Each structure stands twice: as C-alpha cells, then as structure tokens.
Image: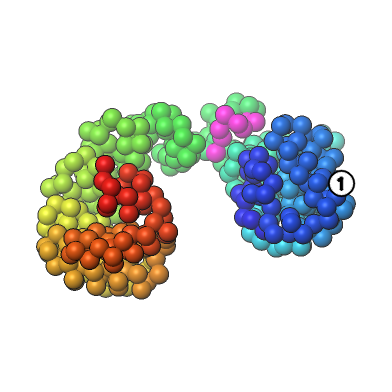
Amino acid sequence: MKTCVFLLICLAVPGSAVLGPAYAQMPDQALQHLRDAQSLNESGHWDAALREYRAAAALAPNDPETHFLFGIALYRERLFDEAVQELTLSVHLDPGVVQQDALNKARASQQYFRAAELQRHGDWDAAITDYQRAIDVDPRDERTKIPDLATEHCSLALALRQKGNEAKAQDHLQQAYVLHSRYSQTEECEKLWPSLASTPAKEIARADQLTKQDDLAGALDKYRAVLAMNPSAAEAAHVHRKMAEVLRSQGGQAEEAVANAREAARLQPDAASYHELATFLEWDGKAGEALTAYENGVRLNPQDAQLHFDFGKLLINNHRPDAGITEMRKTLELHPHQRDLASLAHEGIAVALKDKGETESAIAELKADLTLKPTDDTASSAHCMMAEILKGQGKTAEARREAETADDLDPHDAEGGGGCAATLWNPR
C-alpha cells in the first residue's frame, strides 16, 4: 500500500497514484465504484463519494486500501464510529504505519466527541476519562485532527475545573495556551489564560509553537517579550537563537539575525551555538568570522562530525583545500559509513583535490564515495563530478558514460536543472 500521508489532500490524488497493486486486481465492479468515488471526491461531491466507497468496500471486503480511503472519507465527514471500523479493517489487512496513524486519529476523535456527549449529560467523570483518552490515543498536533490537540486540552481543562481539580486543570490549560492556533476552538479557555503564571518558559513554548505554525511575526513579538522578563541565560540563548532563525527565514534582516546568533553564542558558548553562529555568518557573507566560529565549535566538541564537515566545506570554498581536506577526513574518521554525510565528505575531498589538480586522487575519492551506496541525488553528484574530471582529461567516452549515469539517477542534479550531460556539453 502506498504510504500516502494521512491528510485530506490524499483524497485529491488520482486513484492510480494513491492505490497500490491491489487496485488492478479488484473485481471490475468494485474497481469502478472506487474510481467513481475518487472522482467525486476530487469534485467535492462528498455524500455521493461515500456511497461509492461503501459499494466498493462491500464488493472488495479484503482490499485494505479501499477500507483505508473509505475510512478517511468518513473521517472527513465526521462519521467517526464508521471511520474507526473501516480503518480498523485496513490495519488488520495491511498493518502499516500510515494506516495505524490514521486509525489513531479516528479513535482520538471518536473518544473526544463521546466525551463531549457525556459532558452534555452531566457525566463529568466519564467525560474527563474520555477526553484524556483522546489525548493519549493520538497526542500529535495537526491541523487535520478533529479537533486539534489544543482544543482537546482546553476541553479537558474545563471539565477538570468543573470537578474542582484546579491543579490538573491548570496543566491542561497551559498546554492549550501553548498549542492553540486560529483553527482551535478554545474561546472559553482564552478567558482563563490570564490566570496562568507568566513565566519565560511558558512564553518561550508559545513562541516556539507560533514558529511551527508559521506565524513568524507573532513569534518574534513573543520572543522579544520574553527577553523583557529577565529569563535565565539558557532561556535567553534559546530565544536569541530562535529569533535569528525566524529573522533569516523572513529575509532581508541579516544584520539583526546575525546579531541574535552572536548573542546566543555569547550567552551559551557551546559547540552548537558556535556552529549555528558560523552558519549565520556564512549566510551573511562573513566567511572569515564564520571560520573563527567553526574553529571554536570544533575545539569545544571535536567529536561532532557534521561540524567538521561544514567547517571543511567552508575552508574548501575559501581556497584552503588542505585545511578543508583535514576537516573532511575528521568527518570520515568519526562516521566512515554514515550515509550521506560520509559520501558528501568524500565528495568534498574530491572537490579540493580537483582544485589542486590532483585529478586521479579526486576520482579515487569519488569511487570511495560510491562504495557507500549513497542516495540517488548524492550518487548523481559524484558521477557528474567524475564526468567533469574525465572530460578535462580528454577521456570523452568515459565522461559521457558517467554523465549518463548521473542523469539516470537524478536528471536535474546539475546546476540549472538541465542534467549533467547537457551542462557539461551544452553549457548555457
């Protein structure tokens, strides 16, 4: 079964893209119902689509993907009991991770609305139990979850307050505060948020959540508010680090982003902070300062292979091939078989050797890279570099074979998206 992520967008994918090999082996009549259901989904005719899914499931009771797609359609229509039934069948027939995740989501929704019904009838104890079960079954924070996790925590907090359990209610109220988004149904809890203790940790968690929700302006406002709350050095370092990331993602605010990265490293002068500072300085074109930051980082944590690799790459890009090769070799010493870090380290060494004119050694390094069986895009890059070196050596036939191999692995790997062969023989 295709591992289609459990989002409503799955339903918009044409049937042949979503459905696995079983699709072609279903009874013709069931297959037609399933195709019709997919088409109706794409056009927004949800009720008609459900009828077609139901017919397909009846005719193909042992096809897991039919039950899976039917279950998702039922979930979207908030028919949670039936969704759980269909997704349970799907998991029983094909127990994959995606299917189980979908079932967990449906069960969480089923528990939540069962709790809401119990609450309406005044059975607060049972409602509290089911609200908690809804959170426990699927504690993920996703927009497609009905309702979202913030709403679940809010409902549980209100029920706990009704029963006089203030301490536990405050815990869930705080979770709702941290997680809520514009999609959350937390209006009643919003009235209670002023009762929460205003601490740097709470506001940092909220700001981090806003960052995840792509509310970057809101996140920046929160982070700046935290800095006015006299946070600890570790908390302030985290805030400055996150502010730097947000400012960089917004673009055009390099000076402020770098200033925040510098402050994070000053407050928390560890290898991770210097590593991040180096990447910001490199991004802002301050290669000399970035090299110094990398030196501080590897001094503080000489066992960080990624740090050595990034340091080596910057050294090579700044015409210091021997020093760069030393750092790449350190990466390989620490992680000789890790895909794709070790592969990229071999490739980095090959670049440095090529720049030094040591082309045979560069080719040997690329061959060592390929013995690690890297992913297709990394292997494609190695084959393309080998083609470039061989072409420069006048070995045209060998070069073309390597370029063709690169393009077979990743047709758009070469700069410009034209493929390796086209870039080498027909440069723009």
Nearer-the-camera pick, 196 or 351: 351
Q: In this view, does 38 lie above or below 24?
A: above
Residue range (magenta):
179-186
Q: Is 273 inside the magenta-drawn segment?
A: no
Question: Residue at horizontal 82%, vertical 45%?
Answer: 33
Nearer-the-camera pick, 291 or 296: 291
Task: Using residue 177 as the reference point, say whether residue 313 is left or right of it.
Answer: left
The residue identified by callout 1 is 55
Question: Residue at horizontal 85%, vertical 50%?
Answer: 29
Residue 6, image x, y percentages: 64, 47
The kind of secondary structure element at disc 1 is: helix
Residue most extreme to the front: 397
Task: Using residue 397 as the reference point, say whether residue 194 is left or right of it.
Answer: right
Residue 100, image x, y percentages: 68, 57
Question: Residue at horizontal 66%, vertical 43%?
Answer: 14
Residue 296, image x, y percentages: 18, 56
Quarter that holds the C terminus? top left
Residue 420, image x, y percentages: 33, 54
Task: Using residue 119 as the reference point, say whether residue 197 is left or right of it.
Answer: left
